[in-house]
Image (tube, grey):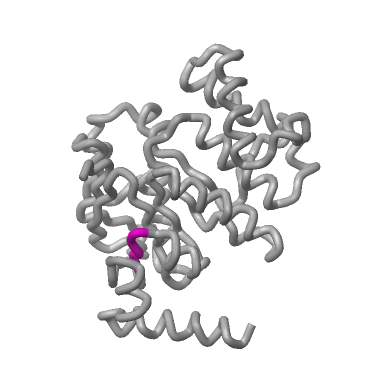
Amino acid sequence: MEELLKVEHLVKSFGTNNVLKDIDFSVNKGDVISIIGSSGSGKSTLLRCINMLEDATGGNIYFHGKNVLKGEVNEDNYRTKVGMVFQSFNLFNNLDVLENCIVGQTCVLKRKKDEAKQIALEYLSKVGMSQYINAKPRQLSGGQKQRVAIARALAMSPEILLFDEPTSALDPEMVGEVLDVMKTLASSGMTMLVVTHEMAFARDVSNRVIFMADGRIEEDGKPMDVFNNPKKERTKEFLSRFLSDKKQA
């Protein structure tokens, strides 16, 4: 198995608040890893540190064996290879859908405009947004915006895609359309690290589930093991709460 990313003894503090405490895990090519846990457990901060949107306080992040935090990898190149899909879409409101998917390619990857346009159209088609290429973000639903954001990330030819709670800002009826795109990506072999509250996705689509609590990884294993036979009390409590919430819904 080819190891793409390795996180080693990662620590992140905001002042006296230790948000991440000695995080260790690795991501192999083709992995779909769901990170679950209560709000405030450090999940999103972990992704932001991996993508270098937050500076880690300590530890190491290796990409293809090179230490990202020690400057062994060019930061801009690294960010294109480790793409990010945000909870709040982060589209450019002044650009239309097609332009949103072209601008990063031409500015960062230095692709010619025609090539960038072809790649953008290909991925917009894959996420079912071809008919909206001339629309501005304000004309789109939340689910449509998130599909554009996924197409934009894919157009940068990433090796890994990080998803930070990609469905949590969506109305319930729009969650399915985004999850369907993510399931298709997973089945195509895309390497994905997904912070999510969508337990069915974590259980049915991932090949690994990481459960975090209080800034630590409490459990890391196959979905069936984590969901059906959790080893740690914290995991059992979290999953039992989730299952009882589902029954009441």
The residue positioned 57% from the left and 20% from the top of the image is 116
**Residue 71 makes an appearance in the image:** yes
Relative to 131, 167 lies left or right: left
Q: Quick one: which residue is furthest to the front in this view? A: 187
**Residue 16 makes an appearance in the image:** no
Span highlighted in magenta in the image: 207-211
Residue 203: give x, y in percent of width and height: 42, 68
Q: Main secondary structure of the magenta part?
A: strand
Relative to 184, 88 lies left or right: right
Q: Is residue 208 magenta?
A: yes
- Of residues 164 and 248, which is closer to you in this image? 248
**Residue 32 drawn above or below residue 116:** below
Residue 102: give x, y in percent of width and height: 60, 24
**Residue 115 drawn above or below residue 91:** above
The residue positioned 45% from the left and 68% from the top of the image is 40
Residue 166: give x, y in percent of width and height: 55, 54
**Residue 221 drawn above or below residue 52:** below
The residue positioned 59% from the left and 58% from the top of the image is 167
The residue positioned 42% from the left and 34% from the top of the image is 158
